[in-house]
Image: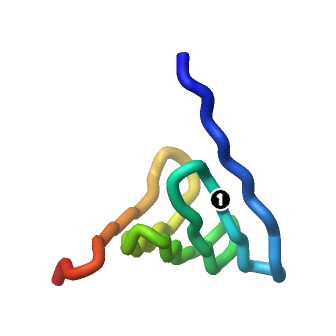
Amino acid sequence: MGLTFRKSFRILPGVRLNINRASWSVTLGGRSGPHHTISSTGRRTTSWNLPGPFGYRSSRRRGDR
C-alpha cells in the first residue's frame, strides 16, 4: 500500500488551500452551495452540494472548451 500526502489550510472564510504530493489547488466557496476549485495542473471544477445523495459536479482541464 502506497503512502499519500494531503493537507488543507483555511486561508480566509470560504477559501482553502489544498496541497498533495503532485499539485496544489485553491477552493472558493463554503460547504453548502456552489464551490469552485482551481488546480495547479489546470483542472477547474465546479461543485454544488445538495441535501441527501444529490450533487452536481463539472470539471474542465486547461484547453478544454
Residue lying farthest to the top in this orientation: 1
Q: In the rendered picture of this protein, how many numbered marks are placed on residues?
A: 1
In the rendered view, does 4 fall on the left or right side of 16? left
Residue drawn at (49%, 45%), measured in percent from left and top? 53
Q: Secondary structure at mark 1?
A: strand
The way the protein has been coloured in the rendering is rainbow
Q: Is residue 12 left or right of residue 4?
A: right
Residue 7 left/right relative to 52: right
Q: What residue is shown with label 1?
A: 19
Residue drawn at point x = 44 percent, y = 73 percent = 46
Residue drawn at point x = 19 percent, y = 78 percent: 64
Tell me the quadrant of the picture where the N terminus can be found: top right
Characterize the local packing of mark 1: few (<14), some (14-19) or many (20 or more) Cα atoms within 10 angstroms. some
Whether residue 24 is situated above or below residue 35 in the rendered picture: above
Q: As rendered, which of 34 and 63 lies closer to the eye? A: 63
Split into 4 quadrants, where in the image is the C terminus? bottom left
Q: Position of residue 20 (x, y in %)?
A: 61, 52
Residue 35 image-quadrant placement = bottom right
Percent coordinates x, y for residue 54 in the rendering:
45, 52
From the viewer's side, name the closer residue of 26 and 47. Answer: 26
The x and y percentages for residue 41 are: 41, 68
Q: Is residue 35 left or right of residue 56?
A: right
Mark 1: which amino acid?
Answer: Ile
